[in-house]
Amino acid sequence: MAEASRASHPRLGEITPSSKPHPPVVGKVTHHSIELYWDLEKKVKRQGPQEQWFRFSIEEEDPKMHTYGIIYTGYATKHVVEGLDPRTLYRFRLKVTSPSGEHEYSPVVSVSTTREPISSEHLHRAVNVNDEDLLLRILQGGNVKVDVPNKFGFTALMVAAQRGYIRLVKILVSNGADVNLQNGSGKDSLMLACYAGHLDVVKYLRRHGASWDTRDLGGCTALHWAADGGHCNVIEWMIKDGCEVDTTDAGSGWTPLMRVSAVSGNQKVASLLIDAGADVNMKDKDGKTPLMVAVLNNHEELVQLLLDRGADASVKNEFGKGVLEMARVFDRKNVVSLLEEMKKKQMPKKSSVR
């Protein structure tokens, strides 16, 4: 009786899909993935514990070639297809293979991935390409915080201010962007706009609460950065707006005029600062004056300007060194000649002996 019972069932090698399988069932769908699963009870005839011998394959259609390629094969009842493109139609079918090698294909299932969710990357991308419409859509969607920084620690407002995108600056500020936020080095949007020379952005940020007194991690203010940038129209407006001209940084104790002496040697910027009251004889933490700094950096024309504007060439630093000695030690030949000529002119003329 037992033998007859066993004989009534097909042998393992003869097990085949009992009917055409149903197409894969679509589960969770995102912008980059599609979940597929299948119900064995409905798709194949199983033989007790031998069900594991049926192999399942998920095949994806190549829309250009209209052919199918296997993206999964095994004995699981679920597969997540990943690495897909957003808002794209995909077509899949299930292949069920018996131990004997016989197989059946399911009908094709079509499913589209979703739209890529709006993220901070989209916000910064909109600013980078100066796309006002896209920026407005993102902000109006309410899914992204306006002050979220990019991978370099810059907010969208900082980037727009640095690049001079005034319309984007206005959009961001009107949508709550904080004009006084600082990045990892302590720079705010005003500093970046001043350095880059975007006067319209500078004026707008000032009207909306940006401060001249904010300092970066090195203790520099917006005027220090404007001096480095060398944009005279910006510096002139900053001074008229009440910006302090002799503020010192936290590192060397340099004023904006000293920064000019050290970095660019820009005479026009130096003249603007001096006209606004910058002290040409102010000393830094090492006792150096703007004239000494200009000499050390071989800014010959700036040295002449500083001398013409009252710089004292007789001042010594904390080591007792004067500008002429510094120029000689560092082989600033043109500056040495200039200082020696000035020294001759300042020497009292000797009276002739009869």
Image (cartoon, rainbow, N blue to C red):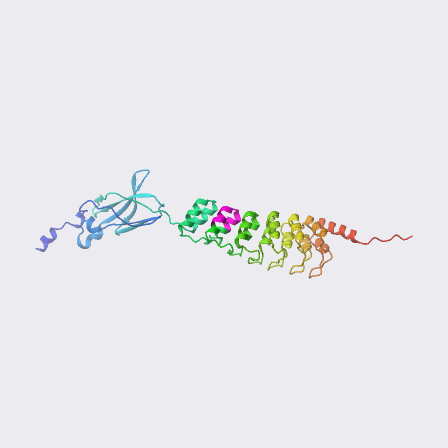
Query: In front here: 295 or 217?
Result: 217
* Residue at x 47%, y 50% (from the top left corner): 172
User: Residue reaching furthest front?
Assistant: 207
Query: In front here: 111 or 106?
Result: 111
User: Residue reaching furthest bottom?
Assistant: 318
Residue 140 picture location, percent across and down: 41, 49
Query: In front here: 241 or 48?
Result: 241
Query: In front here: 178 or 111?
Result: 178
* Residue at x 19%, y 55% (from the top left corner): 49
Judge whether residue 198 can be spotted in this image.
no
User: Residue reaching furthest left?
Assistant: 1
* Residue at x 71%, y 48% (from the top left corner): 334
Residue 90 in which image quadrant: top left
* Left or right placement of residue 304 versus residue 32 in this view: right
* Left or right placement of residue 113 versus residue 253 in this view: left
Residue 119 picture location, percent across and down: 41, 51
In the rendered picture of this protein, how many numbered marks are placed on residues? 0
User: Residue reaching furthest top?
Assistant: 65
Q: Quadrant of the N terminus?
A: bottom left
- Which range of residues does the magenta coloring cover? 158-171
* Left or right placement of residue 185 versus residue 58 in this view: right
Residue 230 picture location, percent across and down: 61, 48
Judge whether residue 307 can be spotted in this image.
yes
Q: Is residue 161 magenta?
A: yes
Residue 243 picture location, percent across and down: 60, 55
| Majority secondary structure of magenta residues | helix
* Left or right placement of residue 184 versus residue 273 in this view: left
Q: Is residue 46 magenta?
A: no
